[in-house]
Amino acid sequence: MMTSREGFLIVADDPVVAREVASLIKRFGPAHVVHNAPTAKEAIYRWMWNGMVVDEQLGNDSGMDLADLARVRDPAIPIAVLTAVLEPAMVNRAARLGAIFVSKPFGPEELAPFVRQSLIREIGSPQVGPILMRISETYSLSPRESQILASVLAGVARDRFLIDQDMSPNTYKTHVKSLLRKTNFLNLSALTAFILRQAASER
């Protein structure tokens, strides 16, 4: 049995969904796609993974059952569950597993918390404060822009941040667009990955 990590495991029976996830994830590491539960179970047992993205609906099988299996196999693995419908029982089950819900349709920002968890797992727990300060100074980020970036790095959900800061979604989007324009990154997940890897290289 192999114990080295093999990148990201993506489980989705819909090829379009699988392709969309893989295109977003592969920039952070190898993406291994499987389309059914039996193949996913074999991959979970055979290899260790940096993280797993699983569609909640897999034909007659349950993605949550695979999440359970992955958690038993590797208690620390980051898991993202793709879903079109949030049901209370499913939400409670995911909470017990420590899994992140990603609602369809999704994009880079929805997967960002999962990517952050996976990168932290891969490179350890780097000190990002000095690099965050350097980026804020280099690119002349506003206090709000620096605050948003720090919240993303800390894994704070956007909705939680908006409530805590009494900020509207439109204001948040405006700050994020300015932040990305100044730093020349396409999205927050790419910027987060850059900061984490820089922090790891400076340990």
Image (cartoon, rainbow, N blue to C red):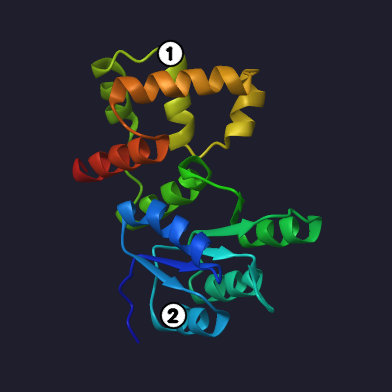
Residue lying at 42% horizontally and 28% vertically, measured from the top left:
149
Residue lying at 33% horizontally and 78% vertically, measured from the top left:
3
Q: Which quadrant does the C terminus fall into?
A: top left
Amino acid on which the number 1 mark rests in the picture: Pro
Tell me, yes or no, whether the two marked residues, 1 and 2, touch with CB atoms within 8 Å.
no
For residue 130, which quarter of the picture? top left
- Neighbourhood count class around disc 2 (C-alpha, 10 Å): few under 14, some 14–19, many 20 upward: some
For residue 197, which quarter of the picture? top left
Give whichever of 79, 26 is nearer the camera: 26
Residue extending farthest to the right is: 88
- Neighbourhood count class around disc 1 (C-alpha, 10 Å): few under 14, some 14–19, many 20 upward: few
Q: Which quadrant does the N terminus fall into?
A: bottom left
Q: Which mark is residue 73?
A: none
Residue lying at 44% horizontally and 61% vertically, measured from the top left:
19
Tell me if residue 157 comes above or below residue 96 in the rendering. Answer: above
In the rendered structure, the answer to whether residue 185 lies left or right of residue 37 reads: left
- The residue at which mark 2 appears reads as 43
- The residue at which mark 1 appears reads as 143
